Amino acid sequence: MKKPATPVEPLPNVLIEPIVRAALAEDLGRAGDITTNAIIPASQRARGRIVALRAGRIAGIGAAGLAFTLLDQSIRFEIEAPNGAEVAAGETIAVVEGPARALLTGERVALNFLGQLSGVATATARLVKLCEGTKARVTCTRKTTPGLRAMEKHAVRCGGGFNHRFGLDDAILIKDNHIAAAGSVANAITRARAHHGHMTKIEIEVDSLAQLEEALSLKADTILLDNMPPERLREAVKLTAGRATLEASGNVSEKTIAAIAATGVDYISSGAITHSPKCLDVALDLEDGALT
C-alpha cells in the first residue's frame, strides 16, 4: 500500500454511511440499474482497478468503498492509495472484485465521492506546499456542499490543511454584519463574552487596523484580517505582537498565498478549496471477460 503523504484517521462509517446510502438511492431511483440488470447475468463476477487519470492527493476512499459494499457485502475492496496519499497519473488507487452487477451499479457513486473529495485534498495540498517555510497553516471555511461538510473537511485534512469551525455552535465568529448590527466591535465582543463561558473561543473579523486595535484591547482570542493586502497584513502582525491568533482571509489563491503566508499570520482560510476545487479525474477499469 502506498504510504500517505499526510496520515489522517478515517471518518467513522457511522458518519458517512447515511450519505453514501442516500447517493445510491438517488442513482437507483424507482427501478434500480435497468441497464446493468438487462445485460449482466446475476451470477457474473468481475475485477477492476480504480485509477487516477491525473496526479493528485487522495481523499474519500472510504466512501468509494462503501458505495460498492453497501450494494453487496461480498465485494472485496483493496485500497492501494489511502487517504492522504499522493498519486501519479495512471496509478492504481484501489482494486475491486465481486459481483459484476454491483460493481457496475456502484461505479458512478464511488467515483463521484472519490473524485470530488480528492479534488478538495489536491487543492488544499497545493496551497499548503506554497506556504512551506512559513508558520502559516491553511484552513477551510463553512463554504461546503450542504450535507457533505464532514467529508469535505476531512478531505482538507487529507490535503495537509486544518479545519476551521464545523458549524455555528463550534465557536463564536463575529463577522462584519454582526458588528454592524451590534453597533461596534466593542459591543459585539462584550455581548459575546457575557453570553458564553471561558471554554468558548471568540474570533472577530476586522477590515482595518483601527478595528484590530479595538479587538486586541478587548482580548479577542483570534482575529480574522479580512481582505487585507500583504503590506497591511505585515502591519497587523507587528501591531498584534503575539497577543492574538491571526487569520488572513479573502483573495486567497495559488497566486497570492505565498505572499500572504510570508507576512507572519498564523492561519490562512480559503473557501475555494471546498466550494470550487477541480474534481480529480478517476476511473474504474474492469478486466475483460467474466470471472468464474
Image (cartoon, rainbow, N blue to C red):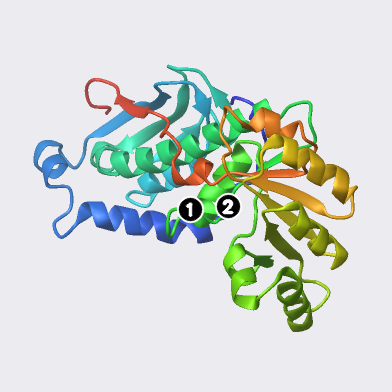
Q: Which residue is mark 2?
A: 141
**Of residues 125 and 223, the one drawn nearer to the viewer in this rendering:** 223
Q: CA distance from mark 2 to mark 1?
A: 7 Å
Q: Given contact means CB atoms under 8 Å apart, are the residues at marks 2 and 1 in contact? A: yes
Q: Quadrant of residue 261?
A: top right
Q: Is residue 134 left or right of residue 178?
A: right
Badge 2: residue crowd in 10 Å (few <14, some 14–19, many ≥20) = many
Residue 28: tell me if it is visible. Answer: yes
Please determine whether, in this image, residue 231 is positioned above or below residue 190.
above
Can you say which quadrant of the picture contains the C terminus?
top left
Badge 1: residue crowd in 10 Å (few <14, some 14–19, many ≥20) = many
Task: Give the percent coordinates (x, y) of residue 1.
Answer: 59, 26
* Disc ID at residue 144: 1
- At horizontal 28% and vertical 43% (from top left) the residue drawn is 102
Q: Is residue 50 left or right of residue 38?
A: right
Q: Quadrant of residue 199?
A: bottom right
**Of residues 50 and 213, the one drawn nearer to the viewer in this rendering:** 213
Q: Label 1: state its secondary structure.
A: loop
Please determine whether, in this image, residue 87 is positioned above or below residue 169.
above
- At horizontal 76% and vertical 72% (from top left) the residue drawn is 186
Q: Quadrant of residue 110?
A: top left
Task: Give the percent coordinates (x, y) of residue 36.
Answer: 16, 40
Q: Is residue 115 left or right of residue 213?
A: left
Task: Give the percent coordinates (x, y) of residue 14.
Answer: 52, 61
Q: Label 2: state its secondary structure.
A: loop
- At horizontal 15% and vertical 37% (from top left) the residue drawn is 40
Residue sitting farthest toward the left: 38
Please determine whether, in this image, residue 123 is positioned above or below residue 19.
above
**Of residues 19 and 54, the one drawn nearer to the viewer in this rendering:** 54
Tag 2: amino acid: Thr
